[in-house]
Image (cartoon, rainbow, N blue to C red):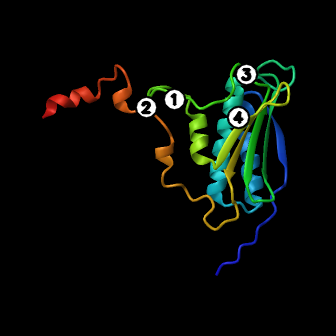
Amino acid sequence: MALVVAQEVPTSSSMAVPHGPAGVGRARHRMRTQLREGGVPDPVIDDAVLILSELLSNACKHGRPLGDAQAGDGDVRAAWRVDQQGRLVVEVTDGGGPTRPAPSTPSVTAHGGRGLNIIAALADDWGVRDEVPGEVTVWVVVHAAVWERDAGHRRDDFAARVTAPAVADIPGLGFADAFDELD
């Protein structure tokens, strides 16, 4: 029988991140360091860091900086915590954008548009809060029970939960037609 001692992760880690790619690496490094020092299992940390990267990228691409700053000049806010129930929660807050964050269904050849689908596949839960004027927060419960023995073990059905259109449903691809004459 193994004895697991839960170390204390700072109850609230929050930082201003420049609106743009410059601060994303610093935020990932800070999160990884703090969660590792707090005893969070590495697979959970890996998921959390990927989710933070996706959220910050979306905030910089689709959202405005907080306050009155112009795009590229201001900040967005990144925060993470392990709450009293042992849930690891990651949040990114920006100044909002033209649309509410929602998963999309990009084409197979699209260079982007999969971030929220990846987050939904990795996370136990996620959502959007926009009740504060001028702020939109995307929150993610990375793992609902960080201190469980199997916390962070990759889910076997991950690939099945990342949605993409079926090849046959993609107009003009013609890929499957090439095999019809091979009989």
Task: Tell me whether the residue at label 4 lies in contact with that at label 1, contact meaning CB atoms closer than 8 angstroms.
Answer: no
The residue identified by callout 4 is 56
Tell me the kind of residue under disc 1: Thr
In the image, which is nearer the foreground, mark 2 or mark 4? Answer: 2
The residue identified by callout 2 is 165
In the image, which is nearer the foreground, mark 4 or mark 3? Answer: 3
Task: Tell me whether the residue at label 2 lies in contact with that at label 4, contact meaning CB atoms closer than 8 angstroms.
Answer: no
Position of residue 105 relative to residue 68, above or below, is below
The residue identified by callout 1 is 105
Q: Pointer 4: residues within 10 angstroms few (<14), some, or many (20+)?
A: many
Residue nearest the observer in this picture, 100 or 119? 100
Compute the Cα span from label 3 to label 1.
19 Å
Q: Is residue 31 left or right of residue 42?
A: right
The residue identified by callout 3 is 97
Tell me the kind of residue under disc 4: Leu
Q: Position of residue 100 (x, y in %)?
A: 69, 26
Q: Residue furthest bottom?
A: 1
Residue nearest the observer in this picture, 177 or 54? 177
Compute the Cα span from label 4 to label 1.
20 Å
Q: Earlier in the sequence, mark 3 or mark 1?
A: 3
Compute the Cα span from label 4 to label 3.
14 Å
Q: Earlier in the sequence, mark 1 or mark 2?
A: 1
Task: Tell me whether the residue at label 1 lies in contact with that at label 2, contact meaning CB atoms closer than 8 angstroms.
Answer: yes
Residue placed at 71% from the left, 60% from the top? 40
What secondary structure is marked by label 1? Answer: loop
Q: Locate the C terminus by quadrant.
A: top left
Task: Tell me whether the residue at label 2 lies in contact with that at label 3, contact meaning CB atoms closer than 8 angstroms.
Answer: no
Q: Position of residue 18 (x, y in %)?
A: 79, 30
Residue placed at 85% from the left, 26% from the top? 133
